[in-house]
Amino acid sequence: MPQLNGGGGDDLGANDEMISFKDEGEQEEKISENSAAERDLAEVKSSLVNESETQQNSSSDSEAERRPPPRPDTFRDKSRDSLEEAAKRQEGGLFKNPAYPGYPFIMIPDLTSPYLPNGSLSPTARTCVNVPLDLHLASCCSPLMQYLQMKWPLLDVQAGSLQSRQAMKDARSPSPGHIVSNKVPVVQHPHHVHPLTPLITYSNEHFTPGNPPPHLQADVDPKTGIPRPPHPPDISPYYPLSPGTVGQIPHPLGWLVPQQGQPVYPITTGGFRHPYPTALTVNASMSSFLSSRFPPHMVPPHHSLHTTGIPHPAIVTPQVKQESSQSDVGSLHSSKHQDSKKEEEKKKPHIKKPLNAFMLYMKEMRAKVVAECTLKESAAINQILGRRWHALSREEQAKYYELARKERQLHMQLYPGWSARDNYVGGYGKKKKRKRDKQPGESNDLSAPKKCRARFGLDQQSNWCGPCSL
DNA sequence: CTTCCTTTGAAGCCA
DNA sequence: TGGCTTCAAAGGAAG
């Protein structure tokens, strides 16, 4: 039922996702967790450190420790509760109640529903389309809109445009190109916007229109120390801005919406190129997939490539660096070997793995955690996020699993021939020596929290991370 | 400048 | 099939 097409083959609903729920009997106990909802972040941090202590005292090292026993929502913080409430009130989001209780068998919403039998957009859908996209896309748009935006972020919804709407009405339009922005794509900042960033806007926070998270309102630029103006209501707080970059705000739809002046995606020498590797041609299956889910005018032409020349952000062309370095003095003297290497790299851009559920969660919540505590080191932040992840309710996690599934799906459509293996440096089992010097019986790096304390000057006796108050 | 740290999950490979 | 490995993000720390 999940899939419109009978699920026939959505093998993307990873089994592991189920496993993840399966093995977490802990999740069951969370039902009674509300009583603990009052516990704040301090406890999160405390338990984080506690875990290390416990691990020290206990020789058991297994997964049970890595995945702590059921924790009745100990880590649910007030903010999240309020967010949940807001989300519930909202009822407009993708994950309306009930939020996929049966996940992972819950799939994409019926995308065709917003369309009337004659193929035109239903009033509801139209309404959504008319809503300025920037204005909290996730909060105001139907699942269709969100999914369409994910699938075809190039839809310039905000523009709103008459133009876009008109174009959308024109079923004869040969390609999505007519509804895309003509802004120039630029190079993606490595740490800026994930290609599929729009997915992140599913955050509950973003489901509350016009109410940016309090902790971000008076945000301070971590690097400059300059207080940032409150994020405009139409801008995701997860896209930090410096005072002069308003015009360069990464579009919430992230990866395909071109930005001016803001590096988003790599461009090749010509300024424009085929946005996707030639392997990305929309094959028959994809075409039928799309056709089954979208009105004809939404389905990309078979020749495959986006007409915008905007590459998928998952593509990280080493060229970005190369170009800058090549422009340097020594570039002309690069050896033939290097040239051939570069040629190879050109031919084979690095396509990143799609983000998994936890990665999506991290991406969304990192800023919040950073804002809530003084920590900036990702290792420490990730520990906290890991704990929070486990503290999430089943439904909340399901959101991210669903998003991740969509990401994989989209990724697979964009890069049919891609394999995770492609990104293995030097091939599997070789290269990239990861430390991973964990002994078989050793738990998950008992020293990590210690390191954390040491690094951040925390009280060795205390289990409480002062700076973080988590 | 590169690698590590740290998290979870996806995916690939090998026995 | 289970176990192991790598990579995805992030940014400070360390080498």
Image: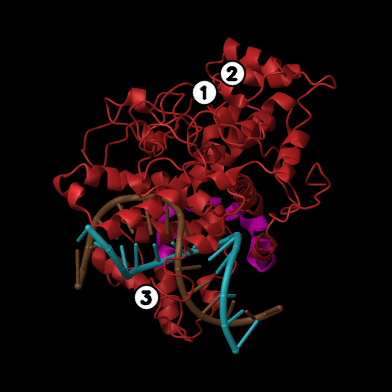
Chain colours: A red, B cyan, C brown
Q: Secondary structure at mark 3?
A: loop
Q: Secondary structure at mark 2?
A: loop
Q: Earlier in the sequence, mark 3 or mark 2?
A: 2
**Residue A131 image label:** 2
Q: Residues within 10 Å of mark 1 (few under 14, many from 20)?
A: many
In the picture of the structure, the residue carrying the numbered disc 1 is A135
Give amino acid for label 2: Val
Pinpoint residue A69: horizontal percent, then vertical percent.
57, 70
**Are the residues flagged by discs 2 and 1 from a single subunit?**
yes
**Residue A435 image label:** 3
Pinpoint residue A447: horizontal percent, then vertical percent.
35, 76
Residue A98, visible in the rendered structure: no
Residue at x 42% of width, y 32% of height: A272
Q: Main secondary structure of the magenta part?
A: helix
> Which stretch did the figure color magenta?
A21-48
Q: Which of the pair A56/A200 is nearer the observer?
A: A200
Give amino acid for label 1: Leu
Q: Residues within 10 Å of mark 3 (few under 14, many from 20)?
A: few
Residue at x 66% of width, y 64% of height: A16
